[in-house]
Image (cartoon, grey):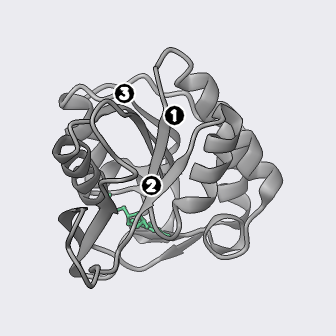
Amino acid sequence: MSIQYKPFAPLVQRIKQDGKCLEGGILKVDSFINHQIDPTLLQSMSIEFVRRFANKEINKILTIEASGIAPAVMVGFLLNVPVVFAKKKKPSTMDNMLVTEVFSFTKNKSYTVCVSKDYLHEGDKVLFIDDFLANGNAAKGIIELVEKANATLSGMGFLVEKSFQHGGDYLREKGYQVESLAIIDSLDNCKITFKE
Ligand code: 5GP
């Protein structure tokens, strides 16, 4: 499907400079996003998200631990709204928790994702922020948690989308506003090809 896509040049440049391609369609961005973090780039990407979702009502940022937390906190700081991260560990008591299962293709296994009903509830207008959008499984889990809470998803923002895994197609067809700052069309032969 054709989408409205505006690459965020500072991120695209940085991926070109420091991104590493691994076997199996994985992009490694450990030197500026996933292990060491470049706070200046993080700030500029977060400002860009705020700009792109300026038309939306948002009272909460939601992400999944651990790699989504840094961008989510920065966006929450800029919007002055709380940031909730869904936890990947099964709670010892299921009381008061919203729970779903997410399949991770990078780890090739399913894991439980949960969030307390105290921090996600009816009437919340939620912006989901994450580092990567691939097959969209994490995003689908978030949609389920938001629906279980009777909250509303105002939009979904990703630093990097890998279009060849089609999670973005699914989410856009469902009608969600999906904003990805860099879209990668292919990692074939370990060559990073960006969407134009
Ligand atoms: P999805 O659920 O959309 O299939 O995958 C999204 C999740 O998997 C992200 O939260 C991210 O942590 C991880 N992920 C997917 N693809 C990549 C990748 O190419 N590089 C890195 N570093 N993480 C990825």
Work out how far the residue at label 2 is from the one at label 1, CA to CA, in angstroms: 28 Å
182 sits to left or right of 165: right
Location of mark 1 (residue): 196
Number of the label disc, if any, that sits on residue 177: 3
Viewer-proximal residue among 163 and 43:
43
Specify whether tag 3 is near ligand 1 (CB below 8 Å): no
Any part of residue 77 in sight? yes
Residue in the image at 20% along x and 73% along y: 94
The percent position of residue 193, horizontal first and vertical second, equals 50, 52
Viewer-proximal residue among 185 and 154:
154
Mark 2 or mark 1, whichever is nearer to me: 2
Work out how far the residue at label 3 is from the one at label 2, CA to CA, in angstroms: 16 Å
The percent position of residue 124, horizontal first and vertical second, equals 36, 34
Q: Do the residues under discs 2 and 1 have CB atoms within 8 angstroms? A: no
Looking at the image, tell me whether mark 2 or mark 1 is earlier in sequence order: 2
Disc 1 residue type (three-letter)? Glu
The percent position of residue 154, horizontal first and vertical second, equals 38, 28
Q: Secondary structure at mark 3?
A: loop
Residue in the image at 23% along x and 51% along y: 145
Q: Residue furthest top?
A: 55
Residue 170 figure quarter: top left
Q: Secondary structure at mark 1?
A: loop
Residue 117 figure quarter: bottom left
Q: Is residue 140 above or below residue 187?
A: above
The percent position of residue 149, horizontal first and vertical second, equals 23, 44
Work out how far the residue at label 3 is from the one at label 1, CA to CA, in angstroms: 20 Å
**How would you rate the neighbour count of disc 2 (Cα within 10 Å): few for under 14, some for 14-19, many for 20 or more?**
many
**How would you rate the neighbour count of disc 1 (Cα within 10 Å): few for under 14, some for 14-19, many for 20 or more?**
few
Location of mark 2 (residue): 63
Location of ligand 1 given as a quarter of the image: bottom left
Q: Do the residues under discs 3 and 1 have CB atoms within 8 angstroms? A: no
Q: Secondary structure at mark 2?
A: strand
